Amino acid sequence: MTACTSPSPTTGHGNKTGREIGDDTDGSEWTGGREGNGGPHGSAAPPGCVITADGTYAARLALDGESWFPERWTLDGPEPYAVPLPGNQPEEPGTEVLPMTDGRVLIHRLAADRHLFSLLYPTGPGTGELQLGAVQCADPAAELRLLPPAPCGERAYALALGRSATAVWLVAGGAFGPELLAQVPGRCSGGVWLDRAGRLLALDQELDGGTKSVAVDLEQGGAVSPLLQIADDSNDRLLLADPDSGLLLIRSDAPSPGHERLGWGVLGSTLPVRFPECLRVPDGHRITPFAIQPGQILTPESCGVALRVDGARGSWVGVWRPAARRVLHLPAPEGWLAGAGLWSREGVLQLPYSTGAVRCGVARVGVSWEEEARECQDREGGREGSRERGPGSEGALGADAGDASPRPERSSAEPSSAGPSDAEPSDASPSGPVVARPVPLQQAPLEGRMPEEVTVG
């Protein structure tokens, strides 16, 4: 996989110049996948839009009739608004877009086995385009996808999967077009930033039949170091990380081999990784965390976590924090760009949506964790005299969803009352007793029922 000779950055208009590089192809043979994220155990479907790390801009591929075009959302003003960035011809459905903090939008197209990168920006009635160059894969079927927005917002990166190694490319923000930064052995998926500087990137490395998360130092030539190794034969993936608190959201089959579970840990801590019972997923459902509340310095237990919940009734929103014992469910706003959203430092969850009436909207939901804590205490008190009935399953996904929904503090559109606000009941049997003392998995066999807490490393 090599970088093609990059032209000096020039300013064009529309998409015509980008398509002409492709030797008369219209890009319809798209093989780079936004959904390509590690096979059957990869992440859920991509979010409906991509938001910068600081929450100032978002970008998505919008549909006008049968034509796709890039669209930029401005989110840091009094009211959100959208700016269309159409070119001279429609985009292909697989085209990726990513917002930069200066207001430009990076676009990734495929043409004649070349991955083309440009920056789009509004120019009065038209769209300006700054070509950045291209990356050509030795294997035409190789995947190349954009990584999540870098914390600085001034650079953008891509992940290219080869047969035996995965390449990390700097595709925007460099001095001379696309630049190869690192080669990581094995096939890698995921992509989570571990620091505010954008130096440490976590990837889920598939090697020798197993998957482990590793940290890649982009300023040290792509030096790779272990990050998650819960058990020798477990598959451990990092889904989200918050640099302020160190909170990590993890998916692993360590506590129950063959069945992945969602857990949490703290970066750099010797405390065990925990797999709460309330995050256990019933059959037919999937939970994917998509946002962590920032600014909670050294207090990971108090960070709010937003969850995308997919079930037979569609997708809705769950909120949870490590200090809580259950997931709070709420209906997504009508037209929610599923899987997209961010928290404010004050704990307000912001969910972007688009409907026929509102092209660009953000629903804001405040979560009362104190009320949730009081309800949990009341439930514990009510069970003191009935321990012989065994532990309940009300912390499981879908339990008590109706009365646990947070109340919106302020919303640009009222979330629809229809939909899966009352989550589907769990078919899972009640859980067994929780072992109070955590057992390091490196020292204990993975047989029988595992404790609720397991250790990293």
Image (tube, helix red, strand yellow):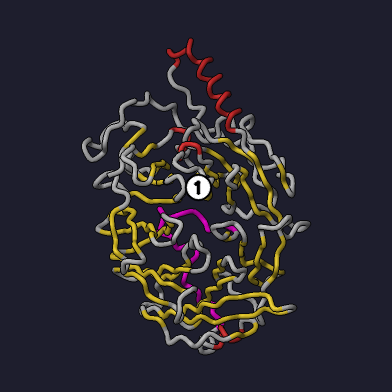
Taking the spot 21% from the left edge, 37% from the top edge, the residue there is: 443
- Is 292 colored magenta in this rendering? no
- Residue shown at 52% from the left, 68% from the top: 154
Q: Amino acid at mark 1?
A: Pro
390 above or below 446? Answer: above
Please determine whether, in this image, residue 188 is positioned above or below residue 179.
above
Secondary structure category for the residue under label 1:
strand
Residue assigned mark 1 = 289
Locate residue 76: give its quadrant: bottom right
Q: Who's the residue at 58% across and 29% down the image?
A: 370
The crowd level at tag 1 (other Cα within 10 Å; few <14, some 14-19, many 20+) is many
| Depth check, front residue: 76 or 437 | 76
Q: Quadrant of residue 181?
A: bottom left
Which of the 4 image quarters holds residue 407? top right
Q: Position of residue 24 (x, y in %)?
A: 54, 89
Residue in the foreground of this view, choosing between 350 and 160: 350
Residue at 43% x, 87% y is: 5
Q: Which residues are magenta?
A: 26-48
Q: Position of residue 155 (x, y in %)?
A: 49, 69
- Residue 334 x %, y %: 70, 49
Horizontal relation, residue 384 to residue 180: left or right: right
Which quadrant: the C terminus?
Answer: top left
Residue 28 in magenta stretch = yes
**Residue ranking furthest to the top:** 385
Relative to 25, residue 237 above or below: above
